[in-house]
Image (cartoon, rainbow, N blue to C red):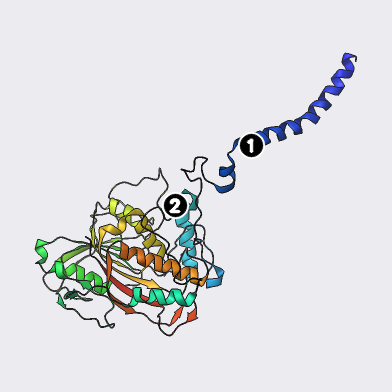
Amino acid sequence: MPPADLRGVLPRVAILLIPPILITIQLMVVFRLPQDQRDTGTAADGTGIVYSVISIEPRMSARHGTASTSAGTLGLPGVGRAEGAEEMEKLDDRGYEDENEMPTRQARGFVLQSWAAEEPSFTAELNRILPFISRPQVNCSRVLSPGESQASQASGSPDLRWLLCAEEWLLPAEKKTCVAYSFSMDGGDADFIKTVLGLGCEVHRFDPSYSNASGGHRGNSLASSHGDDGGSGVVIDHKMWLEWRSLRKGTHRKRGILGSVSQTLRDIMQALSHHKVDFLYADLLSAEWRIFQNWMEQGTLLSIQHLVATVHLQWAGFEVDGTNEEVVRYWFSILHGLKASGFQLVHSSPGEGRSVLKQSTASTHSSYTLSWVNMEN
């Protein structure tokens, strides 16, 4: 064939050959990837995890009457819905791990328990969780009640919102140092703060809506308070909230400075150089379930001595989803994990309402304020 004719044919041949070459390269890449890794997301040797699958989908569901959030964001419950959504969007851009960057959920501390009955049953799950949220598991001879810093005889009255087991706090306050954390957005922690201040505790109060906290820097000249009964302490305010996801690797913050970004309890304690929290009050307004799970997985739960927290049952909670029986089973697993970590229920105070996951119930309330003591510390 004359050279002139070859020059006209070669470009056409090249164009025809390009698609088969690209397909061949793609097939070579696919067949080089091990079969189990393509299908299951696990490493070829079975020892590593490429991605994790979570049994409780971490999203809010429209079935529970709430809007879906971006993956992994707890948001700021208790703030108005429009304000909360705006705050969640802000927080989500600050370098938190997304779902697939986090370790497997059941890696440590948290284990999803078996079903209460042979078949998934909302009634069976509800009957199983009820004792965990209504029956004290330990008797304390001396307790601290709301607003009081002097121990008194134990009282099981449900009229008291919470109780602190006080046997170990009978020494004069000056002989014992303590650290207390309070997470509340509605001022419901006033009596708690008064009580721990009377013990001489260093109190850290966390509220993302608090306007007078100077960035949450430890040691700032913030509001101080003193107990009325001889003990005295200081309150340090932080304009921030709790998060159940860790900051991304490479996102660093100076030690001792928290700023206004939400962080896990472990990160907060590290920033404040605290190895133990003697008293912790938490009204997280439906974010408590994921927060508790984070405390188990990161081992932070072992650093808490006394815990007062409100659990909400009227809907699944932030970042929790599933069928009604799956959600209650998940809640029970969280409470079971607390008990397995050494926490015993001292007092239970039922809240208002008689609905669980929007279903009316006769024996269960919509929320409970629970007081635990860590018997293993």
Q: Quadrant of residue 224?
A: bottom left
Given contact means CB atoms under 8 Å apart, are the residues at marks 2 and 1 in contact?
Answer: no
The structure residue drawn at horizontal position 54% and vertical position 47%, both measured from the top left corner, is 41
| In the image: residue 96, left or right of residue 300 | right
Q: Position of residue 203 (x, y in %)?
A: 23, 63
C-alpha span from label 2 to label 1: 28 Å
The structure residue drawn at horizontal position 38% and vertical position 55%, both measured from the top left corner, is 261
Give the quarter of the figure containing the C terminus.
Answer: bottom left
Residue 211 in view in this figure = no
For mark 1, give the secondary structure.
helix
* In the image, farthest residue toward the bottom: 362
Label 2 crowd (10 A; few <14 / some 14-19 / many >=20): some
Q: Position of residue 2 (x, y in %)?
A: 90, 14
Tell me the residue that label 2 is attached to.
104
The circle on residue 79 is none
Q: Amino acid at mark 1?
A: Phe
Does residue 16 sit above or below 305 in this rendering? above
**Front residue of 201 and 114:** 114
**Front residue of 248 and 360:** 360
Tell me the residue that label 1 is attached to.
31
Does residue 311 sit above or below 96 in this rendering? below
The structure residue drawn at horizontal position 33% and vertical position 64%, both measured from the top left corner, is 338
Give the quarter of the figure containing the N terminus.
Answer: top right
Residue 352 in view in this figure = yes
Q: Quadrant of residue 312?
A: bottom left
2 or 1: tag closer to the N-terminus:
1
For mark 2, give the secondary structure.
loop
From the image, state whether disc 2 or disc 1 is nearer to you.
1
Q: Amino acid at mark 2?
A: Thr
* In the image, farthest residue toward the front: 118
Q: Position of residue 14 (x, y in %)?
A: 79, 26
Q: Position of residue 243 (x, y in %)?
A: 39, 58
